[in-house]
Amino acid sequence: MPDSPIARRIRAALEQAEDVDLHHNRIELQVGEVIRLEGEVDNIAVKRRARQIAQAIAGSTPVEDRLMLRVETRRGDDQLRQAVLEALMTEPAFRDYAVGERADGPPDDGEERYGIAVEVSASRVRLHGRANSPSHRRLAEVIAWWVPGTADVENRIRVHPPRQDNDEELSEIIRLVLDKDPTLDASAIQVIARDQEITLKGVVGSDVKRKLAAYDCWYVPGVHRVHNQLQVRPPG
């Protein structure tokens, strides 16, 4: 464990954060020109929160999130890549995309081309390409996260032409993600986005589904906090 003052401050903040729980999540710090978080964590909420806490303390020093999720399904790189490609190709939102082909440079024929390419190394998925909206970029990342065996997703997809992001678009993609989750009844969940913080209201059937709804929000890049106000429906 590095003995620098900033490392001690970050470690102390992580230890105090109940939603990180260092007793069950192994997080190591590498401090230099960039602060790197490494290790394995239980779920996407811990991964996102750990980076936010570290960045708040690091200030202008960049924080690189290299944390991996613990996965039950281990797959070889080629097998995981193929699974991610198949998941993207079967998603209706990408029916006009060249999935498997990288299209992130300027078009040479005057026509916009959108595509997503996938690389995999040691359970870490990297997405490249060009998307026509922030929502498509976000959806591609969520789909990659949902593929069994994915321990990390690095999203390098570019939005072209560039567009101003906003809370309305963020709430819309979260509603879409919740609707695509077969374990949830999205019609019973209300999504409110404000300053990139998400509030969930409504009723779900169990504590597990309550947690899964929050995880679905954290899978969406750009979410800063999730306020889970979902109520669990009493049995009977």
Image: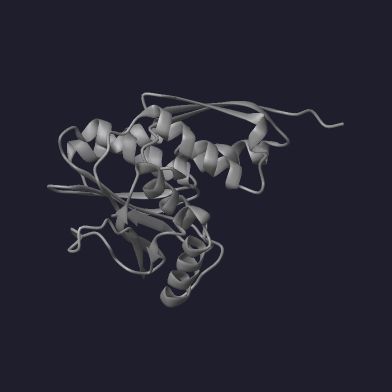
Q: Residue drawn 60% across and 47% down?
A: 181
- Count of numbered tags: 0
Residue 86 x, y percent position in the rendering: 50, 67
Q: Quadrant of the C terminus?
A: top right
Residue furthest out toward the front:
110
Of 179 and 196, nearer the camera is 179
Q: Which residue lies furthest to the right in this view?
A: 236
Check the image and tell me how it is coloured. one colour
Q: Nearer the viewer, residue 57 or 87?
A: 87
- Relative placement, left or right, of 171 versus 184 is left
Q: In this view, does 153 lie above or below 44?
A: below
Q: Can residue 64 be seen in this view?
A: yes
46 or 197, which lies in front? 197
- In screen coordinates, is 170 left or right of 33? right
Residue 17: in sight, yes or no? no
Query: As rendered, which of 27 and 206 lies closer to the eye?
Result: 206
Q: Where is residue 145 in the image (x, y as percent from the top left)?
A: 47, 55
Residue 113, image x, y percentages: 30, 59
User: Residue 93: x and y, percent?
Assistant: 48, 52
The residue under the point 58% across, 38% down is 213
Q: Is residue 64 left or right of residue 133?
A: left
